[in-house]
Image (cartoon, helix red, strand yellow):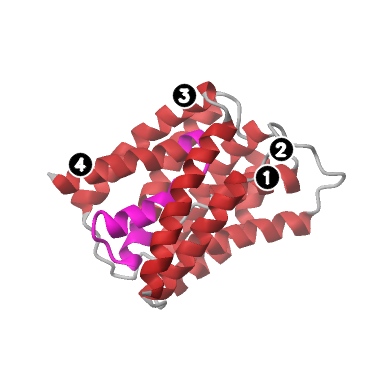
Amino acid sequence: MTTLLLALAAGAVTGLALGALGGGGSVLAVPALIYLLGFSPAAATTASLVVVTVTSATALVAHARGGAVRWRAGAVFAAAGILPAAIGGAVSRHLPATLLTGAFAVLAAVAAVRMLRPSTAGGTAPAQVRPALVAGAGAGLGAVTGVLGVGGGFLAVPSLVSVVGLRMRAAVGTSLLVITINSLTALAARAGSHIDLDWSAVGPFAGAAILGAWDGKRLAARLSAGTLQRLFACALLAVAAFMLADAIG
């Protein structure tokens, strides 16, 4: 019963972040799976991909109904990350647990810092959209998704704003398309890794995350993006510090 309640609570927070911010949920999901539910780092990153794939796809539907998804831009951005995501997913199974934990702690800290930095409510189109920059940003995001099992929305949203020139609302919705494609690709690359997952925990986690994503979409309409980002950033900083200490210790 305790495991079930922890899975439901952690899943709800993960979905809330994905639905409200278009990212950030997966960097909470992995440590929750490791430290609350007892998953190994390899199993946690794989389970996170399952949760993030179904949750981001669900949140994508909600944002698409509101006209906040730019399908062509998102597809081009995601296409650049498909191969790196597949390679990263295959490589991750050979990395030691301490390296995965340490790398994830650093990534969580970077995500928190990005969320704490002031951002504009809307994007300003760059003077010229450079295909090389779009491809590089998409490839980098795909690699991060494959290795660490995160959707990478906290990286995708600012990239879609600054590189592609989308406004913030469209960037959040479009990032969910990118996250879904990258996560599904990375998950497929891990299909032969024979990592056993505790579906009695993953199932409720994913279910709560899906419901949380819908609530997150509604929450985003009521609270400012800055307030939401600061709340999640503080949580991420605490998670990053704990994981880094655990990896070093």
List the single residue furthest toward the top.
222
- Residue of label 3: 218
- Residue of label 2: 166
Disc nearer the start of the sequence (4/2): 4
Looking at the rendered structure, the secondary structure element under dot 4 is helix
- Measuring from the top left, give residue 216's x and y in whole percent: 44, 31
Disc nearer the start of the sequence (2/1): 1
- Measuring from the top left, give residue 30's x and y in whole percent: 37, 56
Disc nearer the start of the sequence (3/2): 2
Is 23 colored magenta in this rendering? Answer: yes
Is 63 colored magenta in this rendering? Answer: no
Q: Residue at x 43, y 74 (%)?
A: 99
List the single residue furthest toward the left.
1
How far is disc 4 from disc 2 in space, using C-alphas?
A: 39 Å
Q: Nearer the viewer, mark 4 or mark 2?
A: 4
10 Å neighbourhood of mark 2: few (<14), some, or many (≥20)? many
- Residue of label 1: 160
How far is disc 3 from disc 4 in space, using C-alphas?
A: 24 Å
Magenta-tinted stretch? 18-47
Q: Quadrant of the N terminus?
A: top left
Q: Residue at x 53, y 40 (%)?
A: 230
How far is disc 2 from disc 1 in space, using C-alphas?
A: 6 Å
Looking at the rendered structure, the secondary structure element under dot 3 is helix
10 Å neighbourhood of mark 3: few (<14), some, or many (≥20)? some
- Measuring from the top left, give residue 155's x and y in whole percent: 60, 51
In the displayed structure image, the side of residue 61 where residue 67 appears, left or right? right
Q: Nearer the viewer, mark 3 or mark 2?
A: 3
Identify residue type, mark 1.
Leu
